Image (cartoon, grey):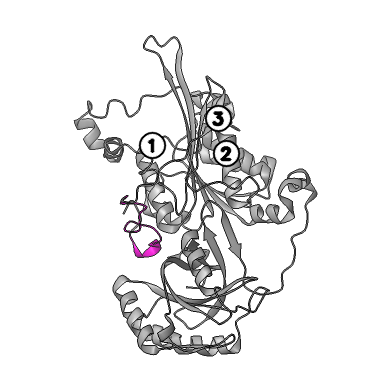
Amino acid sequence: MIATQSRITFPVLVFEEVKQHLLRGDAEEVALLFAHQAITGCTAGLVVSRWVPVPPDALLIQRQDQFAVDSDFVVRQVKEARVRGESLLLAHSHPGDNNIPYFSRADSYGEANLYALLQLRLPGRIHGAVVFSPGGVSARLLYPDQIVILATVRVVGRRVQTFQAAREVVPPASDSMYARQELMWGSQGQHLLREATIGIIGAGGTGSVVAQQLIHLGVGNLIAVDPDIVILSNLTRIVGAHLSDVDHTKKVDVIARMAQDVNPEVRVRAIPESVCQASILRELVGVDLLFLCTDGHYSRAVINALGIQYLIPIVDLGFRIEMNQAKDRVASAIGEVRIVVPGGYCLSCAGVLDAERILAEKANPKDRAAFPGYFANLDVPDPSVITLNSAIGSLAVTIGLDILIPTMKSTSELDSFRFNALKGLTKHEPKAKNPMCGICSSEGLSGLADDHPLPCD
């Protein structure tokens, strides 16, 4: 089960609550974290969904360098985790350590006793431990075969924070190729980009712009998903497309070729398939960020749910041009960029998704042939212009980078942006979160990871 990367992912609100509880005094504090597994070919780990503090009456020992928890309290929590199908992590503090904390021998001894119980009561699952100090966070995972691996802690909200376990830290070296952008976010920021894996859903007008910019910026890995072939009308708006591509080159292959031409260091996984398949979604589970560049409502609904389920930040973007009734003048030209992150709204909350349209797009070819009137507007092309796609694509990439590399003014998880091309104005228009949303509320899909079916299953 062990993958090349082991990590624990927190929604930012849970992380901050746990941190505040554990570092509130001079004595070691303890909490139990409950999580769901997230396993792909290259990453394995846990997505934290809830936590409970260990109350004072359940702490048999509580000193600055030692703690012991009442076994009855732990057993009750393990029973609850078993009912919910959860993994368990032990979290505690090193309040006097101003550096990145190390796991002590006492920590290892205490965890060994807990792991024996977890392997008996919650078998076949990954479990783990996290230690907080004023200087940082360290974590490790226990796999079912008893191997313990240090893990990265990833905190996802409007900004992504990453904590490495205590080990020798080598500062990233500067790269002359990226010297000008490093002046903005430093060699550490460039290192974060180089290590990142970003998914692009839709490789058409906006998706190709997003891909081009990420390639120039030096993102380490791109996964591009789009089933379509380049057609003649695409040449006016797909960046990197050639006349020779018409009617035979996949749009995602244009992105892969662009990376080879511009920046061969960027590795591109080109997937010429619909994203609405479990096998394709599985390849996106471990990405750091998703750009949603498709016009389809079903595909957007699927990615929206995937991001909520696995705590993957999403940047959703699109541009819509509407003509007047005579079709001789532009009535409106509006581009929007929306973010979907833990603690914020989702595309369902934002009223972006049309339920009837989703059902129509999910229909099979047989149904479409039998009821052509119902599906009449599905394949009607909308106006599209490369200059407007580029404007909204650039705004989306800038916001996406600010999620991974905090460089701009601090903003909210409710962010959304609206560009009115006719007026030449960009407005910040926060969206409201629906606390009763069946997708992103606490009773929805948030953080369920592999312990819930994929959105298109």
Q: Position of residue 328 (x, y in %)?
A: 44, 9
- Report the front residue among 189 and 242: 189
Q: Position of residue 176 (x, y in %)?
A: 80, 49
Distance (Cα) linking label 1 and label 2: 18 Å
Looking at the rendered structure, the kind of residue marked 2 is Val
Q: Position of residue 136 (x, y in %)?
A: 62, 70
- Report the front residue among 155 and 264: 155
Rendered image quadrant of residue 118: bottom left
Q: Which residue is mark 1?
A: 296
Residue in the picture at 76% in, 46% down: 183
Looking at the rendered structure, the kind of residue marked 3 is Thr
Label 1: element kind: loop
Q: Earlier in the sequence, mark 1 or mark 2?
A: 2
Write the start and end of the magenta stretch as one range.
Answer: 437-452
Q: Is residue 439 magenta?
A: yes
Relative to 81, 243 lies left or right = right
Q: Earlier in the sequence, mark 3 or mark 2?
A: 2
Q: Is residue 136 above or below residue 390?
A: below
Q: Earlier in the sequence, mark 1 or mark 3?
A: 1
- As drawn, the label of residue 210 is 2
Label 3: element kind: strand
Report whether residue 63 is seen: yes
Distance (Cα) linking label 1 and label 3: 24 Å
Q: Tag 1: Cα neighbours inside 10 Å, few (<14), some, or many (≥20)? A: some
Q: Which residue is mark 3?
A: 426
Report whether residue 119 is seen: no
Q: Nearer the viewer, mark 1 or mark 3?
A: 3
Rendered image quadrant of residue 135: bottom right
Looking at the rendered structure, the kind of residue marked 1 is Gly
